[in-house]
Amino acid sequence: MSTEIEISFKEKVDIKRLPEHIAIIMDGNGRWAKAQGKHRIFGHKNGVKAVREVTEGCAELGVKHLTLYAFSTENWNRPKTEVSALMQLLFLTIGKEIKTLQKNNIRLNAIGHIHNLPESNQKALREVMEATKNNTRMTLTLALSYGSKEEITEATKILAQQYKDGKISLEDINTETISNQLYTKDIPDPELMIRTSGEHRISNFLLWQLAYSELYFTEKFWPEFTRNDLFKAIYDYQNRERRFGMTSEQITEQLTTNN
Ligand code: IPE
Ligand code: IPE
Ligand code: MG
């Protein structure tokens, strides 16, 4: 047993300066399971608890949007047995978690190639999204069969078609019109992106939307990630200076005039 005393970060978080949107790459389920001599699927099953922890943690603080990377376009290339186990787990989880979503007034949303998921999963997702559509406390977006390069490619095709049909001119293509063609058009860009398991990469997640996000990496594997780890990440984010290309002096001046 560890004798280390865990610091509680909840009280350290400044509720007035919360990120509006947090995005998470939930990574490390397989390695967590393997470290205990268990099968990778055991890791995925235990990852569900961490999903509940961060969902409730975000809602509790007042974060408006949480986006979880649950299955990437590239994850289809995993062994068939792992893919079907993940799909089954997703199906069961969506069914079970509806209670938590309703209790916490959370709306469920999904982005990605949802049409590529098994029909049973699509149906379960549709039902829960419909049942929670009027919930207002927070939007939980699941990125499923999601790939950012594919998302940007599709947006490009839509704009090219609109141009070809004479509906828009070349000048109409700008960062805003591109953003409006992405799956995330109704969601602000994440201010904070967290990745667990010690990997320092984006893995085709929200490439456009993360342009100015603060990136937070932790060594913890996803099944070990707790509410307090989430609060710690937010606290870390709040102690950074977001300069957006400006100088530190300009940012300080902006802050003093705004307060
Ligand atoms: C993240 O954990 C879950 C999914 C990608 C579906 P991994 O399954 O990638 O676990 P590691 O990274 O192999 O340990
Ligand atoms: C990214 O994790 C995708 C999800 C967490 C759903 P991966 O484990 O698939 O990413 P790589 O292969 O390490 O880049
Ligand atoms: Mg991984």
Image: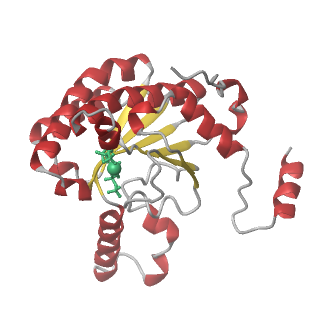
Q: Residue at x 86, y 55 (%)?
A: 252
Q: Residue at x 38, y 62 (%)?
A: 181
Tell whether 72 sits left or right of 189: left
Residue in the foreground of this view, choosing between 224 and 124:
224
Q: Residue at x 23, y 24 (%)?
A: 95
Tell whether 245 sits left or right of 176: right
Please say whether residue 124 is visible from this viewpoint.
Answer: no
Q: Measuring from the top left, give residue 43's x and y in whole percent.
A: 29, 34
In which quarter of the view is residue 77 placed?
A: bottom left
Q: Please, is residue 177 above or below residue 38 in the view?
A: below
Tell whether 173 sits left or right of 148: right
Q: Please, is residue 121 above or below residue 52 in the view?
A: below
Q: Measuring from the top left, give residue 73's x and y in whole percent.
A: 25, 57
Q: Please, is residue 202 above or below residue 166 in the view?
A: above
Q: Measuring from the top left, give residue 80's x and y in whole percent.
A: 10, 48
Q: Please, is residue 186 above or below residue 13 in the view?
A: below
